[in-house]
Every structure is written in structure tokens, then in C-alpha cells.
Amino acid sequence: MALFSLLKILMFLFNSIIFFGGLGLLGIGLCLKIDGSSLTDFLGVTVSPFTQLLVVRYLCIVIGSILLLLGILGCWGAIRENKSLLLLFFIIILTLFLVKMASAMIILIFSSTVNVLFAHIDSWAVRTLQESYDKKEDITKMWNTTMKELQCCGFHNYTDFNGSTYQNQSGGYYPIFCCKENFPCQESGIANDKKGCLHKLKESLEKNGKLIGGVGLGISVFEVAAMVVSIILFFKIDDISYG
């Protein structure tokens, strides 16, 4: 009985950690969504490369929500000593764990495609700044939102606007997002601390990637522990019943 009680306590503890880990992932996903909400309003065929970089927000929200429910399910199954709930918990969490491991392996194997993705975005981004900025409303709105939210200028830097349709029509001026003051300026008025959106985007991905990876790794450890405890409890319930 002492061992059984200890297993129940461990099950409750591990599932509490899974619950709060899921809450953390959900929080990260929601924060990322809020930070980029106005940007996502413009995501579609025109800016499809960005979609692949923003999908992590929704993955965090979905996985975080699943972990929240799993934490509740595991705790309830242990408290009620319900074999069906414990078995369901074990199957779901094992499936989720295997899917995450498979996804991690795929990401490692195809990590080289990241460079291809950025090369594709590079070509598309510079072309839209040169040819479509201030000419096509959807492109202009998307870039204005991106530069405002990321506090950046151009894709690489302000030189992406050199010789562009916008610069030619404005008489050699750059957008306000590139300037020291809050109005369009010429090269002498460019803010030296303004970096390109590519640099800002990579910074954001590295920062959030480490945070998400750390939370995910920690949750995986407790998932394995919870799986072991849940299957032991599953069989121990019969022993206690017949004992």
C-alpha cells in the first residue's frame, strides 16, 4: 500500500509538471501570436514564405493545450484509481512522445532546408521592396507592419530601397522606419542602429527556439516518467483489488 500511495503521489506530481509545462507552451504560443497578430492578417499567397516561419506559434498553442488536458487526465486517473483513464493517458502520451521524437528527427535530417528557405525569402523580399513597395497596397501594408513590429528597415538593411520604385517616386527618400526621425528621410537621416528584418527575424527565431526547445525537452523527461508510473499503477490497481 505504501508503494501504491507513493506511485499515486508521483503520478500526480509528474502530471502537475506536464500541466504547467503545457501552460508554459500555451503561454509562449499566445504571446507569439499577439506579437505578430497584425502581421498574420496579411499572410497568404503573397507572403507564403513567412507562413512557414510563423507556424511554430500555432504548434505551441496546440501542443500546450494537449499537454494541459493530459495533465488533468493523468491526475484524475490516479486519484480515482481508474484503469481506463490510466490506460488512455498512457496511450495518448506515448503517441504524443513518439510524434515529437519523429518530428525532431525529421527537423535534424532536413535542417539544411533552412538555408534554402531563407534564400527563397531573400529573393522574394528584396524583389517586393524594389518593385512593389508603395505600389501594391497589400505588399506595402505587410512590409510596414513587419518593419514597425520588428523595428527594422528593409530585408538586409536600408540599401534594399536603393533604386526602388518607392525611392524613385519619392525623390530619393527612405521610409520612416529607416530614419532617425518619424518621417521619410534621405541617406543622411538614416538611423544607424536600425537593422534589417532578416537579422531581427533570425534573432527572434533563435531566442524563441531555445526557449521552446528547453521547455519541450523538460516536458519529454516528465512524460517518460509519467508513462512508467501510469503503467505500473495500471497493474498495481489489480494487485490492490485482489489483495
Image: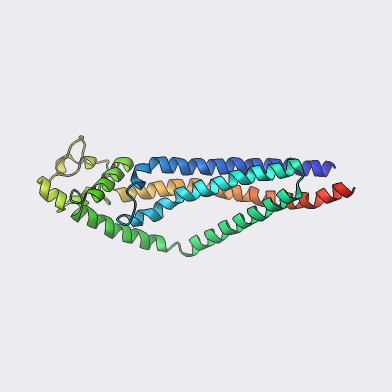
Residue 183 seen anywhere in this rendered image of the structure: yes
Instruction: Decide: is 119 above or below 175.
Output: below
Q: Position of residue 1 (x, y in %)?
A: 85, 42
Give me the residue at 41% from left, 50% from top.
Answer: 54
Q: Is residue 192 left or right of residue 115?
A: left
Q: Is residue 215 visible?
A: no
Please tell me how many numbered marks the rendered image carries: 0
Residue 150 vs residue 168: left or right?
right
120 above or below 4? below
How does the figure colour the protein chain or chains? rainbow
Residue occupying the far right of the picture: 243
Quarter of the figure with residue 186: top left
Kindly identify the residue that appears in the image at 44 percent across and 46 percent down: 207
Horizontal side, residue 37 vs residue 2: left or right = left
Foreground of the two, 18 or 66: 66
Q: Residue furthest top?
A: 181
Instruction: Out of 143 and 201, give the one closest to the viewer.
Output: 143
Q: Is residue 51 left or right of residue 84?
A: left
Front residue of this view, candidates 210 and 78: 78
Measured from the top left, where is residue 201 in percent x and y? 36, 49
The quadrant holding residue 112 is bottom left
Tell me which residue sits at (43%, 43%) in the image.
32
Q: Residue at x 63, y 41 (%)?
A: 17
Whole-percent x, y for residue 147 in the image: 28, 44
The residue lying furthest to the left in this view is: 171
Residue 163 at x, y percent in the picture: 14, 53
